[in-house]
Image (spheres, rainbow, N blue to C red):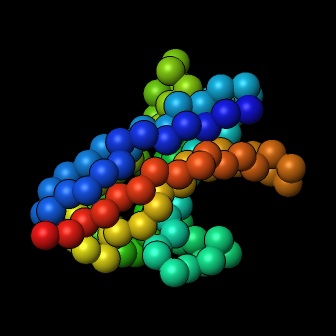
């Protein structure tokens, strides 16, 4: 099982980034895909859910702090989930993690990609 995030970087406030998470080794199309983030100084248990997208209907959910700025999508043919982030703010600075979940014991994580928003 592999989940590999990419697309992070250092950007100025107001900029956009698109994160990608390429997966392999499991039936991605049967898993809910999620993006979490862990802000500097926070513990793993304090990761917050950024967005999720279901496996079948493609229904989406977002953290309250997103407020229409981010969009999650998936391409099951490419086993990849994306996070389009617009109007980035300094408080969006965090390490962003990809997660695939189907139930207890079927919960996989990537290593994360760093997003830094600073002028």
User: Eyeballing the image, is 18 above or below 25?
Assistant: below
State the residue at coordinates (20%, 52%): 16
Report the side of 10 relative to 5 (left or right): left
User: Eyeballing the image, is 27 above or below 72?
Assistant: above
- Residue found at the very far top of the displayed protein: 77
Q: Where is residue 89 in the image (x, y as percent from the top left)?
A: 23, 71
Q: Where is residue 111 in the image (x, y as percent from the top left)?
A: 59, 49
Q: Position of residue 18 (x, y in %)?
A: 31, 44
Q: Nearer the viewer, residue 95 or 56?
A: 95
State the residue at coordinates (52%, 18%): 77
Q: Which of 23 and 68 is in front in this view?
A: 23
The C terminus: image quadrant: bottom left
State the residue at coordinates (33%, 69%): 92
Can see residue 62? yes
- Residue found at the very far right of the displayed protein: 105
Q: In which quarter of the image is residue 69?
A: bottom left
Report the side of 36 relative to 6 (left or right): right
The N terminus: image quadrant: top right
Q: Where is residue 91 in the image (x, y as percent from the top left)?
A: 31, 77
């Amino acid at each position: 099982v592999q989940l590999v995030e990419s697309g992070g970087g250092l950007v100025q406030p107001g900029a956009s980034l698109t994160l990608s998470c390429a997966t392999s080794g499991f039936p991605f199309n049967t898993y809910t895909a999620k993006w979490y983030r862990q802000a500097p100084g926070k513990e793993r248990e304090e990761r917050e859910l950024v967005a999720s997208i279901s496996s079948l209907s493609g229904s989406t959910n977002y953290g309250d702090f997103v407020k229409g700025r981010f969009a999650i999508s998936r391409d099951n043919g490419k086993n990849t989930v994306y996070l389009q982030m617009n109007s980035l703010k300094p408080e969006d600075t965090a390490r962003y993690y990809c997660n695939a979940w189907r139930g207890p014991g079927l919960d996989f994580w990537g290593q994360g990609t760093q997003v830094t928003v600073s002028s």
